[in-house]
Image (spheres, rainbow, N blue to C red):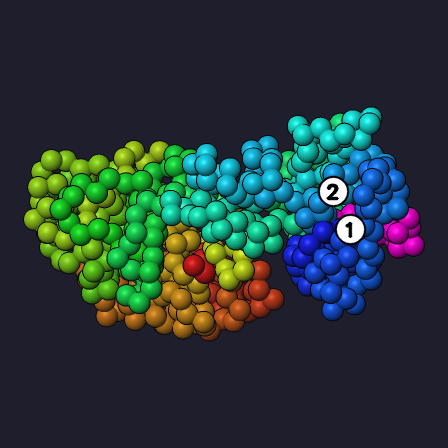
Amino acid sequence: MKLAGMASNRGRNLMNIADRVPGDVEFAVVLTNDADAPVLEKAADRSIPTETVERPEGQSRTDHERRVLDALEGYDFDLVCLDGYMRILSDTFLDETPTTLNVHPSLLPAFPGMDAWGDALDADVSVAGCTVHVVTDATDEDGTVIESEIDAGPIVTQEPVPVYEDDSREDLQDRVLYQAEFRAYPRAVEWFAKGQVTVDHDAEAVHVDGDDGGQFPARRLVSGDRGTELRYGENPHQDAALYVDNTVSEASVVHATQRNEGAKALSYNNYNDADGALSLIKEFDEPAAAVIKHTNPAGCATAGTLAEAYERALSTDPMSAFGGIVALNRECDEETAAQIIDSFKEVVVAPGYTDDALATLFEKENLRVLDVGELGDRTDRLTEKPLVGGRLVQERDFQTVTPEDMEVVTEREPTEDQLESLQFAWQTIKHVKSNAILFADGTETVGIGMGQVSRVDAVRLAAMKADEHAEGKDADGAVMASDAFFPFPDGIREAAEVGIEAVIQPGGSKNDDMVIEAADDHDMAMVFTGSRCFRHD
């Protein structure tokens, strides 16, 4: 796509678009109505042809626009982009050219005037920004400007920026011009270049493909209010803050009440780990407990009572659980609380506490006690990971696997008890960092191998954990879950050596036949789920 740019001064946005080349666009020409406009030199530096069409005193708007059209006639362009072009355009120009865009330094229709930044500060708003819109005629039949029609064309996109308490007009202007406009204008141009925009001039409406209410719209805005500044981030040399999304109704550690107000505040890592722990225990309907360390489960279990579930979860790896996060999916009772304070923990998260449980937990001065309220449904559908220069957004992994979903691929079939254990293992391993291997006996973890770059090493780590760290249980007779397929049979052989009797894995490797053969050689049952459950964050 080729562009015609029109500016009266520096043409910052035009040059930004020329440098960034959104959608592989290029400028056919840049035109100005001021022979001294700096944009002429800037365009020439980029080998962009230029035209100058000044308006002599007394020349009508219509005659000047016809001269502008004459100057552009020799250039092939598909879109006109205005950038501080200090002339109101009428249908004389607009009817003869492709769609014309302009950027205005406010979130229209708010503050349409010449001093948008000052107007925003005077109005004491918390958010300002810019708007890219289609230019429409703002004159009457005599060529007189109709003030209410200026910048009133249909909106293509907007970009918000925050307004801070100590902002001066210059501070806000700089943020709008060099942050908001430099994001919004190239985005709009790229949409046009890719054919994602439909302009209905008769209806004065714009439609952007993908902006139809889906969960991955063409333009995604994420808003949050600063809840608190944290002591530091992942490390003491990193500053950090917590931002809160008040539209989320799901039980969360962000909105949790800290019941022991005198204890120190949660840290960046506390929030991260507590969120992971809470997400894990939401998987289960039965009383469940999990102990998390550095966002990985050190142990997880379900049982007939909460206290029993916690005991089984802790016994998986009590050494690694030191300084960890405890999450429970039932109201915490005194019996469970007494076990929790028996060793050092940073945070406990639960949907409520009995008075006796609180009294017991409060014996530990700096154990943070979070009450998330009723767990309810998991309603927050998306997760995201910030990247330098962007962010990844995906659906949450809500998959569940039932025995009916499991494809038995070995000669030996799993027993009913093993099927229950395999199901528990699969729901838990979803929350273990990949490459992940999990050993389970009944509905409790036995050994967990996480975050390895080799799957067989993850098996070895889980075996070591079961052998050296687990208390009162081991891998003999347990089942194994793998978050992705086994590329080779070595992982099966390692598991067989420590007594694993059944395996759940996605399948799908080109070496599945070899892996199945290895399981048959060791009289192991194995089922395929047909879907993996990687977790890389």
What residue is disc 1 on? Answer: 33
- Examine the structure image and report whether residue 375 is included in the region drawn in magenta: no
Identify which amino acid the numbered label 1 is placed on.
Answer: Asn
Q: Where is the C terminus found, in terms of image quarters?
A: bottom left
- Examine the structure image and report whether residue 71 is included in the region drawn in magenta: yes
**Side (left or right) of 466 relative to 157:** left
Q: Position of residue 503 (x, y in %)?
A: 43, 59
Q: CA distance from mark 1 to mark 2?
A: 9 Å
Q: Which mark is residue 298?
A: none
Identify which amino acid the numbered label 2 is placed on.
Answer: Arg
* Secondary structure at numbered mark 1: loop
Q: Is residue 259 visible?
A: yes
- Residue farthest to the front, as pictured: 57
Q: Residue at x 31, y 56 (%)?
A: 268
Q: Position of residue 496 (x, y in %)?
A: 39, 68
Front-most of residues 480 and 51 = 51
Q: Earlier in the sequence, mark 1 or mark 2?
A: 1
**Side (left or right) of 260 relative to 195:** left
Q: Residue at x 82, y 46 (%)?
A: 56
Q: Position of residue 84 (x, y in %)?
A: 68, 48
Magenta residues, start to end: 70-81
Q: Residue at x 24, y 64 (%)?
A: 320
Q: Residue at x 32, y 44 (%)?
A: 227
Q: Quadrant of residue 285?
A: top left
* Secondary structure at numbered mark 2: loop
Q: Which class describes the residues within 10 Å of circle 2: few (<14), some (14-19), or many (20+)?
A: some
What residue is disc 2 on? Answer: 87
Q: Position of residue 197 (x, y in %)?
A: 73, 42
**Side (left or right) of 414 relative to 179:** left
Q: Quadrant of residue 305?
A: top left
Question: Mark 1 near mark 2, Cβ–Cβ under 8 Å?
Answer: yes
